[in-house]
Image (cartoon, rainbow, N blue to C red):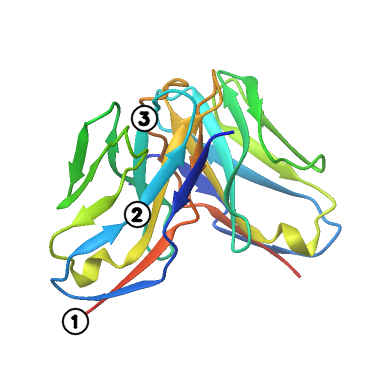
Amino acid sequence: DSGVTQTPKHLITATGQRVTLRCSPRSGDLSVYWYQQSLDQGLQFLIHYYNGEERAKGNILERFSAQQFPDLHSELNLSSLELGDSALYFCASSPHPDSNQPQHFGDGTRLSIL
Amino acid sequence: GDSVTQMEGPVTLSEEAFLTINCTYTATGYPSLFWYVQYPGEGLQLLLKATKADDKGSNKGFEATYRKETTSFHLEKGSVQVSDSAVYFCALPSGAGSYQLTFGKGTKLSVIP
């Protein structure tokens, strides 16, 4: 058990809809990262929050947004969903942004767009 | 930008065989290097890491040595077990101030009895 909790585990929805993915980091971790895993693109970094503030953006679409709340949990919002958004979305946490510290991953949310 | 090149699988081995999964990287400076493992239906787990050149990371019988000269971090295990069947990812932190992970494409390992 990594200590990172992601909900829900599975989401099935239709094109055009909007969903929210939730992540609770390990106790004491201030950094939250979001990644997308798909068959064609592999594992790609989406966005990073540290102590409530956005730190870096990766290959995140404009239809996607995220935030980190005062209790440090984070939410990833995906809107106007398309078939290509079907993927596994991971959240990872670490105490601080540090190149020597590993990130700890949740079990992911599997999003299926019908 | 930073990148990781990992041998693509799938790799199928018999139990007790020797495993090597190649990983090379391109990066500015000398970042830490990580191997993560993903078992079916689960998230990524840190397998091992190395933080500087010539460091050897090891865990659960797996080893990898940080080779600055060849920019490599190959994963090895002397005798694989069926329970080692998983997808293995090589990764490095990139992006100053954020250190998000850049991953290789992953190598799927299947170990047969």
Residue B103 spot, x, y in % from top left: 49, 45
How would you rate the neighbour count of disc 2 (Cα within 10 Å): few for under 14, some for 14-19, many for 20 or more?
some
The kind of secondary structure element at disc 1 is loop
For the point 19% across and 37% down, the residue is B56
Q: Are marks 1 and 2 on the same chain?
A: yes
- In the image, residue A113 sits, relative to residue A104, either above or below, namely below
How would you rate the neighbour count of disc 1 (Cα within 10 Å): few for under 14, some for 14-19, many for 20 or more?
few
- The CA distance from mark 1 to mark 2 is 24 Å
Pointer 2 residue = B22
- Left or right: B26 in relation to B81: right
Name the residue type under label 1: Pro
Q: Earlier in the sequence, mark 3 or mark 1?
A: 3
Pointer 3 residue = B32
Name the residue type under label 2: Asn
Pointer 1 residue = B113
Q: Earlier in the sequence, mark 3 or mark 2?
A: 2
Q: Earlier in the sequence, mark 1 or mark 2?
A: 2
Q: Nearer the viewer, residue B42 or B109?
A: B109
The kind of secondary structure element at disc 2 is loop
